[in-house]
Amino acid sequence: MNTLFDKIWDAHVVQKVEDGPTQLYIDRLYCHEVTSPQAFDELRRRGIGCLRPEKIFCMPDHNIPTINQERPIEEPISRKQVETLVKNAEEFNLELFGMMHSKNGIIHIVGPELGLTLPGMTIVCGDSHTSTHGAMGAIAFGIGTSEVGMVMASQSILQQKPKVMRISIEGLPGKGVTAKDIALYIMSKMTTSGATGYFVEYAGSAIRSLSMEGRLTLCNLSIEMGARGGMVAPDEITFEYIKGREYAPKGEAWERAVTYWKSLHSDEDAIFDKEYTFRAEDIEPRITYGTNPGMGMGITERIPALESIDEAGRASYIKSLEYMNFAPGESLLGHPIDYVFIGSCTNGRIEDFRAFAQIVKGRKRADNVTAWVVPGSWNVQRQIVKEGIDKILKDAGFEIRQPGCSACLAMNEDKIPEGKYCVSTSNRNFEGRQGPGSRTILASPYVAAAAAVTGCITDPRELL
């Protein structure tokens, strides 16, 4: 009667503190430049090293530029943070995939593509979107900087066991509907706090039909409805994705691993603290209209009327629309946009660039649009070239940048100017998230591509 979450959690319990938290063993710590410096300083202060350095992987991603990475970083704070990570990794004998390294990229894209992220693991990183890795059938969640230090020192962490929720999507997604649209739909129904305190397992025929890339996108966005993390039970799609990757088990170890991984599913009679079911047929390509990811709608729908918003949420609803310069009841189809961003740990995988190229092929980038096309890793960049996607994009007037977090967040040089609209495949549309005063419309790679070639918000189904 165990859930998938219970099975993995219970296998990693070191000890339970009476009337307190659980000491949980951690299989993998991912480390980037933003949330690790204080953790390393704490180790130095205590005169200790990392207990199991071979379990820790470091790479810069948030602050790195996406052009001229071969040159020193110009922005002083970003340069300092990246240099500090390099020094810390060397001092504590940790694996580092630095800038321009063939394995560098956004940490939540690199982990799965190298086979570092595996089913049944516990995985942490000082970054909320660590939930991404749960798509592989793992328990993965973001932690604070002091907890990063705790894991470095002890390879374990103190955690209260969260409640478990199952969200099932039944049926098959329609034309132009991606995992991003499914996630935005769920968030609009659950709100940005609807899963607070829960670990979410995604299930149902629509989820099983998703590719590994799609599942990674879905779990990435779990955090945006308040969840501690999201996960999908591993299956043949998972095993096929992992097989042959650099850090994946090989030979007899592979056979043993798959035998174990096949046991990682919720038992038929497992009891969840909460359950929700939605229909895939109710989901169309989606966009956001406000300043949190839950403020979304189908692309052919209109912004909700004020009367349809509960009284507690009306003030923030009005504030959001004022910031975005939208009106209640307005349709956004045909609304001009200024920027398009495809990339981030949400939609920076090869499948996302295939989708983007599918729409822009044979068309041209609209004159009024600045487009930032940013692969999530050097591995994705190499695949783009190998598949000829780079030529399709170049012919359509798009330039491919170097890997990094880029315009997902304004911590590097890729910032959206004040007042400009950006259709973005990233994960957050908060005020100023992509730059002071920037206006973000979250969408899938299909919707982003359609906007990039028409210059306005367009239903991608018209171009597919």
Image (tube, rainbow, N blue to C red):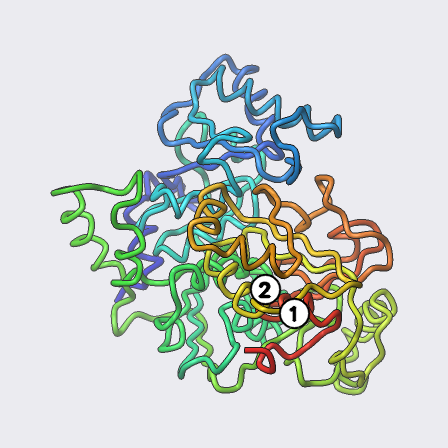
Q: Does dot 2 land on a helix, a strand or a loop?
A: helix
Determine contact: label 2, label 1, CB under 8 Å.
yes
Question: What percent of the width, then of the height, locates residue 199?
Answer: 46, 60
Characterize the local packing of mark 2: few (<14), some (14-19) or many (20 or more) Cα atoms within 10 angstroms: many
The residue identified by callout 1 is 294
Instruction: Quadrant for residue 102, please give it.
Output: top left
Closer to us: 153 or 232: 232
Q: Quadrant of the N terminus?
A: bottom left
Q: Position of residue 253 (x, y in %)?
A: 16, 42
Q: Quadrant of residue 152?
A: top left
Residue 273 vertical placement versus 156 (above, below): below
| Horizontal side, residue 287 vs residue 42: left or right | right
Pick whichever, 338 or 266, lies toward us: 338
Real-space Cα distance between discs 2 and 1? 7 Å
The numbered disc on residue 225 is 2
Asked whether, in this view, residue 232 is left or right of residue 316, the answer is: left
Query: Can you see residue 150?
Result: no
Q: Amino acid at mark 2?
A: Met
Residue at 32 percent of width and 64 percent of height? 3
At x 60%, y 61%, the residue is 224
Where does residue 250 sit, x and y in percent of width and height? 19, 41
